Image: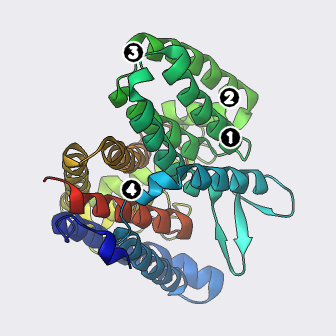
Amino acid sequence: MFRKLIKGKSRPDYLLLGVIISLLIIGIIMVYSSSYVQADYKYADSLYYLKRQLLFAGVGVAAMFFVMRIPYSIWKKYAKLILFSCFILLFLVLIPGIGMVRGGAQSWIGVGAFSIQPSEFMKLGLIIFLAAYLATNQKYITSFKKGFFPSIILIFTAFGLIMLQPDLGTGMVLVLTCMVMVFVAGARLTHFFGLAALGLAGFVFLIISAPYRISRITAFLNPWEDPLGDGFQIIQSLYAIGPGGLMGLGLGESLQKYFYLPEPQTDFIFAILGEELGFIGGSIVIGLFFLLFWRGIKISLGAPDQFGRFLALGIVSMLAVQVMINISVVIGLIPVTGITLPFLSYGGSSLTLALCSVGVLLNISIYSKI
């Protein structure tokens, strides 16, 4: 059915597709390498995380190819419904008995033996809606009242609901991604300066209102002040990366995964990768991400309409922001935020939504002049 609707080149950007598959394969290998010790201890099954990640990857890849065959213009038609559904999910996750608490955040909804994270759906849903809004109202974006303010209200309403869970990391990715889209649409710098001042005040309030955030900031500045508490993750991450050197200790030879670095298969998987594959392995992964971003930007610039340009830009920005935050945390440049590394970290919702997002990007590439 969808094939008849496609009137572009009839083929996606195969280079981008190859990059995604390469990152996914590296991720599956690293999920197993980083998790088999803890999986054997917790579940008496060293393949526990690997089997689930393979399932997530299989579902995600199938969804990616399915979405790739849907003309991206359809998403504009259903943008309001998609956003409304995402807001419903964000409200549902806050209801006791429906939302599941993990790591101090009520961010998941249980579905049988698995769970979904509504904030992940909101990232893509808001990108689709904002792309449609900016494509239609770009001429008003320089006006605070008609263009900039409505966009900001929508963005921070979603951010506020995510912070009620609370999930500062995902909220940061959502806000920064949307700010990139609004800025590229032509918003005035004076409006951004005013928003930055308000944002700084709000950030200070968030830090003061939750003592654990203050401790995270303190741990980031000097993790050795509390090496067994708030500074533990950062220190253990650096202990993983440091010995990796140029070539690494060898695949499967990490020492930090032996119960030193908590949950090494999720937020800190890049630390294990650096320990086992060294500077060269880490550089290859970063190089693949840069190649992804480059192709994504080219697709955005070559898209045939404004909606396609903003949609591609939003997807690329989301992935870029998430990669930069995750790797910055792992190497100790910014405080711990709880953000996964796209396509590499273990996780169902994050991996599936990332692959669906790339599916949309691949469809835009069919029409894009690249």
Looking at the rendered structure, the kind of residue marked 4 is Ser
Give the residue pinned by disc 4. 73
Looking at marks 3 and 2 on the same chain, the residue that comes earlier in the sequence is marked by 3
C-alpha distance separating marks 3 and 1:
27 Å
- Closer to the camera in the image, 233 or 172: 172
Looking at the rendered structure, the kind of residue marked 3 is Arg
Q: Position of residue 55 (x, y in %)?
A: 49, 83
Q: Residue at x 64, y 57 (%)?
A: 118
Give the residue pinned by disc 2. 206
C-alpha distance separating marks 2 and 1:
9 Å
**Which disc number belongs to residue 323?**
none
Give the residue pinned by disc 1. 163
Marks 2 and 1 close (CB-CB < 8 Å): yes
Give the residue pinned by disc 3. 188
Q: Residue at x 39, y 45 (%)?
A: 314
Looking at the rendered structure, the kind of residue marked 1 is Met
Q: Secondary structure beneath disc 2?
A: helix
Is residue 14 shown above or below 49? above
- Counting other residues with Cα less than 10 Å from the Cα at mark 3, is it few (<14), some (14-19), or many (20 or more)? some
C-alpha distance separating marks 3 and 4:
28 Å
Looking at marks 1 and 4 on the same chain, the residue that comes earlier in the sequence is marked by 4
